[in-house]
Image (tube, grey):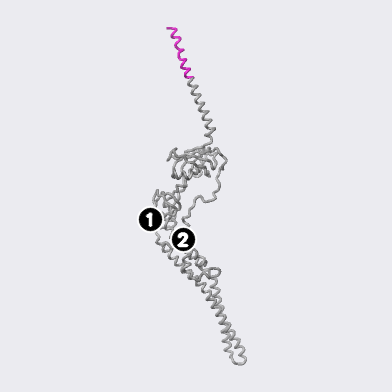
């Protein structure tokens, strides 16, 4: 019994060996994992920067009236797709239509008045010629009477009357010349079309037509209607927001990277993205388009004030704009505000840290140009109709007859 009791404590030796083997195995696994991660980081991971703090952004085009008025029609509603130039909202056009008709009548009357200025030039010139002839006749009468006064054939009273007639003819001639100069001052170096009075009246027609045309509010771009707040019967002021248009064919991603992640980022580097709405099944391809000029906190409503004794450093994030492939957007459209996962390949650092200045406007529309052309056509038509057939010789409406005259939308 005593020998068995003395040998019993030596039995746990096999368990210690098993534990030692497990620890060695675990250490080897950790070492292999560390080596594998090190190789993965050295060969792949260190060339990529990723973040899930990224969201789809795009242009939100505000629709606002250019003139005040009462809403008579709302042609579209939220989620509806519209094309550029399509009417969105109509305002009451009664007052603007009356103002347009009044300005058109004023232009027509002004053109006819200016025509008389050019016609009066010839009339005043004829009057001057007539007064010159009367003066020459009166002077000849005086000379004849002066020659006959010595013989007594003509009395001195008759000679005095002849001399008075010369003075009267001279005064009439001076008056006629002054009238001609005064009228020429109204027409000198101008035509019926380019006369200041006509130009002023034409400007009034253009302004009235613009006010009339702006009672119909068109879509400036293609897009989807969002945030519609306007209602029929509502009185709206100039610049009041009525709705918004979101062109989903021109969206991008704003990815907010930590400041320690952007050291090797450059414009033009390739980017892969996934959207939460589609999951990993859809992978977007993009490129780094540019970097924000400041961090998010710098442009916040209340920027952080770090000049205090209780300052705590916070890692800042810089918005990075990612341009997306237009074809992929057509196949898998995105909406503004959706969450994205972004991974940037920073292996190639030959690009620029700041983008170049754009040579063209980033976004523009030409739907409002037609209104100005229509106004010009109406002005040209009114001038042509009232300038007269002979006005071209005086520089009348010859410059506008070749312009297309559109019918007034009244």
Q: Nearer the viewer, residue 362 or 331?
A: 331
**In the displayed structure, would residue 356 be above or below residue 409?**
above
**In the displayed structure, would residue 27 be above or below residue 165?**
above
Residue 64: quarter of image: bottom left
Residue 297 visible (yes or no): no
x and y, in percent, of residue 244 in the image? 43, 50
Give the number of the disc on residue 374. 2
Question: Which quadrant of the figure contains the N terminus?
Answer: top left
Q: Main secondary structure of the magenta part?
A: helix
Name the residue that disc number 1 marks. 73
For the record, the magenta segment spans 1-20
Question: Which quadrant of the figure contains the C terminus?
Answer: bottom left
x and y, in percent, of residue 339 in the image? 45, 41
Q: Nearer the viewer, residue 360 or 7?
A: 360
Question: Comparing marks 1 and 2, which lies closer to the viewer?
Answer: 2
Give the number of the disc on residue 360. none
Q: In the displayed orientation, state which residue is furthest to the bottom.
A: 152
- Sort mark 1 into few (<14), some (14-19) or many (20+) by Cα contacts within 10 Å: some
Q: In the displayed orientation, state which residue is furthest to the left.
A: 233
How many labels sit on residues?
A: 2
**In the displayed structure, would residue 43 be above or below residue 127?**
above
Q: CA distance from mark 1 to mark 2?
A: 23 Å
x and y, in percent, of residue 84 in the image? 44, 53
Residue 403 visible (yes or no): yes
Residue 5 is covered by the magenta coloring: yes
x and y, in percent, of residue 222 in the image? 44, 51
Mark 1: secondary structure? strand
Q: Tell me if 107 is positioned left or right of 355 in this view.
A: left
**In the displayed structure, would residue 129 be above or below residue 404?**
below
Residue 358 is covered by the magenta coloring: no
- Sort mark 2 into few (<14), some (14-19) or many (20+) by Cα contacts within 10 Å: many
């Amino acid at each position: 019994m005593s020998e068995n009791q003395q040998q019993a404590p030596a039995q746990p030796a096999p368990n210690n060996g098993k534990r030692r083997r497990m620890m060695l195995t675990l250490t080897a696994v950790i070492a292999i994992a560390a080596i594998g991660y090190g190789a993965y980081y050295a060969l792949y991971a260190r060339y990529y920067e990723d973040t899930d703090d990224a969201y789809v952004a795009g242009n939100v085009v505000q629709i606002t009236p250019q003139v005040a008025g009462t809403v008579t029609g709302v042609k579209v509603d939220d989620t509806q797709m519209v094309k550029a130039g399509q009417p969105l909202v109509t305002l009451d056009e009664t007052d603007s239509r009356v103002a347009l008709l009044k300005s058109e009548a004023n232009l027509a009357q002004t053109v006819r008045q200016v025509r008389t200025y050019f016609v009066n030039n010839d009339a005043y010139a004829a009057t001057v010629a007539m007064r010159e002839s009367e003066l020459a006749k009166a002077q000849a009468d005086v000379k004849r009477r002066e020659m006959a006064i010595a013989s007594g054939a003509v009395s001195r009273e008759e000679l005095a009357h002849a001399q008075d007639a010369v003075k009267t003819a001279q005064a009439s001639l001076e008056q006629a010349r002054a009238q001609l100069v005064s009228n020429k001052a109204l027409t000198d170096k101008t035509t019926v079309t380019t006369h200041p009075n006509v130009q002023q009246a034409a400007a009034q027609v253009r302004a009235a037509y613009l006010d009339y045309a702006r009672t119909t509010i068109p879509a400036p771009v293609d897009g989807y209607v969002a945030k519609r707040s306007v209602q029929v019967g509502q009185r709206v002021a100039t610049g009041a927001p009525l709705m918004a248009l979101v062109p989903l064919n021109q969206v991008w991603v704003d990815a907010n990277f930590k400041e320690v992640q952007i050291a090797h980022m450059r414009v033009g580097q390739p980017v892969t993205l996934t959207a939460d709405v589609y999951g990993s099944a859809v992978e977007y391809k993009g490129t780094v388009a540019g970097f924000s000029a400041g961090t998010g906190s710098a442009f916040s409503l209340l920027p952080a004030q770090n000049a205090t004794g209780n300052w705590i450093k916070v890692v800042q994030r810089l918005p990075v704009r990612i341009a997306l492939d237009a074809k992929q957007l057509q196949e898998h459209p995105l909406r503004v505000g959706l969450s994205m996962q972004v991974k940037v390949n920073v292996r190639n650092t030959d690009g620029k840290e700041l983008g170049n200045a754009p040579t063209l406007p980033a976004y523009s529309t030409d739907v409002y140009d037609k209104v100005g052309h229509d106004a010009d056509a109406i002005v040209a038509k009114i001038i042509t109709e009232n300038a007269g057939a002979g006005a071209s010789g005086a520089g009348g409406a010859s410059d506008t007859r070749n312009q297309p005259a559109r019918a007034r939308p009244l």
